[in-house]
Image (spheres, grey):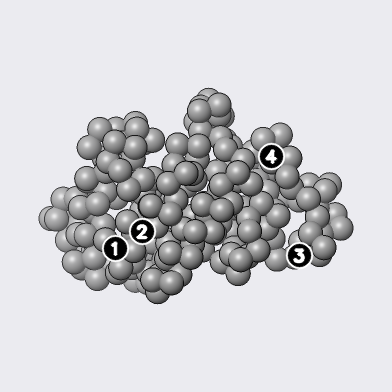
C-alpha cells in the first residue's frame, strides 16, 4: 500500500515504470481533498496539484491499478462532501475503494488547528449523504477514524476500526458504550482535541 498525493502519476512514463516494478497485490491510496481545483490546491498548499492528481488517477486506471481515494475531512471541505462524492462517482468509477477520514490532530494539523479543525458531529449529515451517493453508485466506501457516536446510524455499517492499535484510545465517556467493540475509538495523538459529543451509545 502506498499513501500518495498522486501527482507523480500525472507523468505517464513514470506511471508505466512504477507499475512495472511495484509489488504484487498493491494498492495506491491517493488523497483527494475537493472536487474544485482551487480548494484542493488551497488545502495541499501547492498550485496545480488538483489537475496533476486527477491525471495521475486516470493514468493509474489506464494500467488497471488498484486505486483507493482518500478524502480527509476538515473545516475546508466538510460542507462539500456530497459534491466530492458525486465527482468521484462520475469521474472515477474504476476505483477499488473510497474512504472518508476523520482528522488526526498531529504535526501540521496542530499548527493549523483553528483553520482546519471541525467537530465531526457538525458534518455528520453531509457525511451520510456522501457515503450514500457512493454506495448507491456501486463504489466500495468506508469511514475511517470517526467514533460511531459522531456519525449517523444510517452509515454505521460503513465505519471501520481503522486507527492503529498504538494510536487508539477510548475516553472515559465510552466505558458503558454498548457498541464500543465495533467502534474505532479516538486518536491518542490528538490529545485533548476531541469532540464534546462523544458519549456512550445504548
Is there a contact, CB below 8 Å, between mark 2 and mark 1? yes
- Check disc 3 and report the residue beneath it: 179
- Check disc 1 and report the residue beneath it: 90
Q: Nearer the viewer, mark 1 or mark 3?
A: 1
The crowd level at tag 3 (other Cα within 10 Å; few <14, some 14-19, many 20+) is: some
- Check disc 4 and report the residue beneath it: 194
The crowd level at tag 4 (other Cα within 10 Å; few <14, some 14-19, many 20+) is: some
Q: How many numbered badges does the structure rendering display?
A: 4
Instruction: Pick the residue in front: 121 or 148.
Output: 121
Question: At numbered mark 2, what does the secondary structure look like: helix, strand or loop?
Answer: helix
Q: Is residue 184 visible?
A: no
Question: At numbered mark 1, what does the secondary structure look like: helix, strand or loop?
Answer: helix
Q: Tell whether 200 sits left or right of 139.
A: right
Q: Is residue 89 visible?
A: yes
Instruction: Pick the residue in front: 60 or 47.
Output: 47
Q: Residue furthest left?
A: 13
Q: Position of residue 64 (x, y in %)?
A: 24, 71
Gap in Å between the C-alphas at discs 3 and 4? 19 Å
- Check disc 2 and report the residue beneath it: 86
Instruction: Pick the residue in front: 25 or 123.
Output: 123
Q: Position of residue 156 (x, y in %)?
A: 63, 65
> Reading the chain from its start, which is encountered first: label 3 or label 4?
3
Question: At numbered mark 3, what does the secondary structure look like: helix, strand or loop?
Answer: loop
Gap in Å between the C-alphas at discs 1 and 3? 35 Å
> Reading the chain from its start, which is encountered first: label 3 or label 2?
2
Gap in Å between the C-alphas at discs 3 and 2? 31 Å
Q: Quadrant of the N terminus?
A: bottom left
Amino acid at each position: 500500500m502506498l499513501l500518495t498525493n498522486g501527482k507523480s502519476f500525472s507523468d505517464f512514463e513514470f506511471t508505466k515504470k512504477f507499475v512495472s516494478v511495484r509489488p504484487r497485490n498493491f494498492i495506491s491510496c491517493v488523497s483527494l481533498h475537493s472536487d474544485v481545483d482551487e480548494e484542493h490546491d488551497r488545502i495541499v498548499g501547492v498550485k496545480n496539484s488538483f489537475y496533476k492528481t486527477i491525471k495521475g488517477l486516470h493514468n493509474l486506471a489506464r494500467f488497471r491499478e488498484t486505486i483507493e481515494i482518500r478524502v480527509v475531512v476538515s473545516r475546508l471541505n466538510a460542507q462539500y462532501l456530497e459534491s466530492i462524492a458525486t465527482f468521484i462517482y462520475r469521474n472515477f468509477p474504476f476505483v477499488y475503494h473510497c474512504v472518508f477520514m476523520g482528522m488526526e490532530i498531529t504535526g501540521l494539523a496542530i499548527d493549523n488547528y483553528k483553520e482546519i479543525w471541525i467537530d465531526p458531529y457538525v458534518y455528520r449529515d453531509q457525511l451520510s449523504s456522501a457515503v450514500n451517493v457512493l454506495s448507491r453508485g456501486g463504489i466500495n466506501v468506508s469511514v475511517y477514524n470517526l467514533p460511531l457516536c459522531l456519525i449517523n446510524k444510517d452509515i454505521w455499517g460503513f465505519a471501520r476500526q481503522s486507527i492503529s492499535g498504538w494510536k487508539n484510545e477510548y475516553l472515559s465517556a465510552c466505558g458503558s458504550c454498548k457498541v464500543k467493540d465495533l467502534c474505532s475509538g479516538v486518536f491518542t495523538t490528538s490529545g485533548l482535541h476531541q469532540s464534546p459529543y462523544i458519549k456512550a451509545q445504548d
